[in-house]
Amino acid sequence: MILQSQVLRCLKHFQGGFVLLVVALLCGQVAFVSQALAQGTTAQNRVVKQKADDAVGPLLDTLKTLVGIESGSRDLEGLAQLGDVIAAELKSLGMQVEIIPTKAPDAHPQLKGAELGSIVYGRKTGTGKKKVLLIAHRDTVYTKGMGAKQPFRIDGDRAYGLGISDDKSGVALIMHTVRLLKEIGFQDYEELAVAINGDEEIGSPGSSQFLIEKGGVYDAVLSFEGGGYEKNMVRLATSSIAIVEMNVEGKASHAGARPEAGRNAIYELSHQILKTRNFGDPALGLKINWTVIQGGGTRNVIPASASAIADVRSLFNKDMDKMEADLNAAITEKLIPDTKINLSFYRSRPAFEATPASRVIAARAVEIFKEIGQPLHVAEVATGGGTDAAFAGLKPKGGVLESFGLRGYGAHSNDDEYIFIDSIAPRLYLSARMVMDIGSGQVKW
């Protein structure tokens, strides 16, 4: 009986349990220990569930704070202010925090070495076996001033606000996951880390190398983009993204008196764009769409220059090579002689392709959601969106999984972006339990 009480006390705190387990086994207490372990695990899960339920109000308060600070991808002041808020919270939870500055590569077709939002990187060591990294982004697609038109508000089961779904709810969920684990005294991980970048919406040009590197350091990376709309989900795939820039040089001349003496750059650019309308392969998710075009400047002058930018998507990284080759081959045939065409193909984001470890982690997430009586869909095919999970999953040490954020709707919309409040407790339970199971070494691949 003395031994049994020792085991029960141990199981309440999940500290030193292995030693007592060995003693109990040596003393022939196998059945009791097995039962006690099951009871202890169930009891702890109930505590986590209750903590997650109790955190709904506080998490909404956090969201109100985060949404109230505008943080567009090029709003460096807002990004810095929001970064300071996040860093202060992580420090209060016992994490060592760094603010890591970033800038775009000089070769980036649009940003060309520009200063970007920093990375807030927090770490906390524990006593367990695995290192777990939680990632999200705090930048939004919105320009400064738009927040006044859609402030944080609650209407029924929905909480509205610019950037609330993509991805300030992910940031809030991570912060409260760290808080929940601290409150229950759980440290059975080798390291728990958080990385919140400020340039995801523009392709993470400043933070991508950091994410690639950390993906090779941590045993698991959980990314907190939105967790679905009509149903809860996690993702095993996101799309690869590339930026194509085409510049055409022609020759100016008078549009009325001597148009034939010119070389119309707009005509040539249009010719090249139209040739690509059937490029790609829907079965591979490989597609190109021209989204920005510029040319000329004066009504009565044949334009000497024109340019366009295209968005390219693919399910698989290797298929980007085919698109680049097809585009370069196409520009060798011109409509107008004596024009010059320059084409750049910038790989902005790789595809996130599932690994065996990622599939094991996804299966555990499904099991955890079953504990609270809810189904969790695992999306295995990308739908066109690209996320930072792809960088973390490019050269991973272990498993990467996307979409641990809240269910919501209206990402990139200026009038109806919201999250479902009833998804807060279940998703917080899921994220906390995932850290616990992975960090303690229960999830094996």
Image: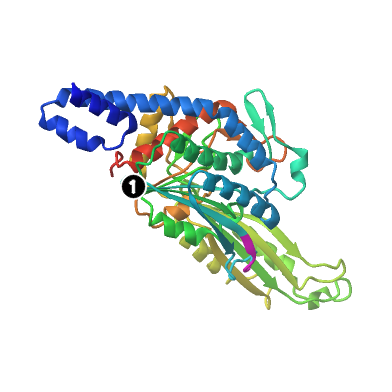
For badge 1, the amino acid type reads Lys
Q: Which residue is pictured at 77% across the width and 41% down the height?
A: 148
Highlighted magenta segment, given as a residue range: 112-116
**In x, y percent, where is residue 13?**
33, 32
Residue at 57 percent across and 50 percent down: it is 87
- Which image quadrant for residue 277? bottom right
Q: Residue at x 15, y 26 (%)?
A: 30
Q: Secondary structure at mark 1?
A: loop
Which residue corresponds to mark 1? 130
Q: Position of residue 43 (x, y in %)?
A: 35, 24
- Which quadrant holds the C terminus? top left
Residue 104 in sight here = yes
Residue under the image location 55 percent in, 65 percent down = 345
Front-lying residue, 365 or 182: 182
Q: For residue 367, what is the image quadrant?
A: top left
Judge by depth and name the residue closer to the eye, 5 or 31.
Answer: 5
Magenta-span inclusion, residue 102: no
Vertical placement of residue 47 versus 383, above or below: above
- Residue 66: x percent and y percent? 64, 42
**Residue 139 in sight from this viewpoint:** no
The residue most toward the front is: 2
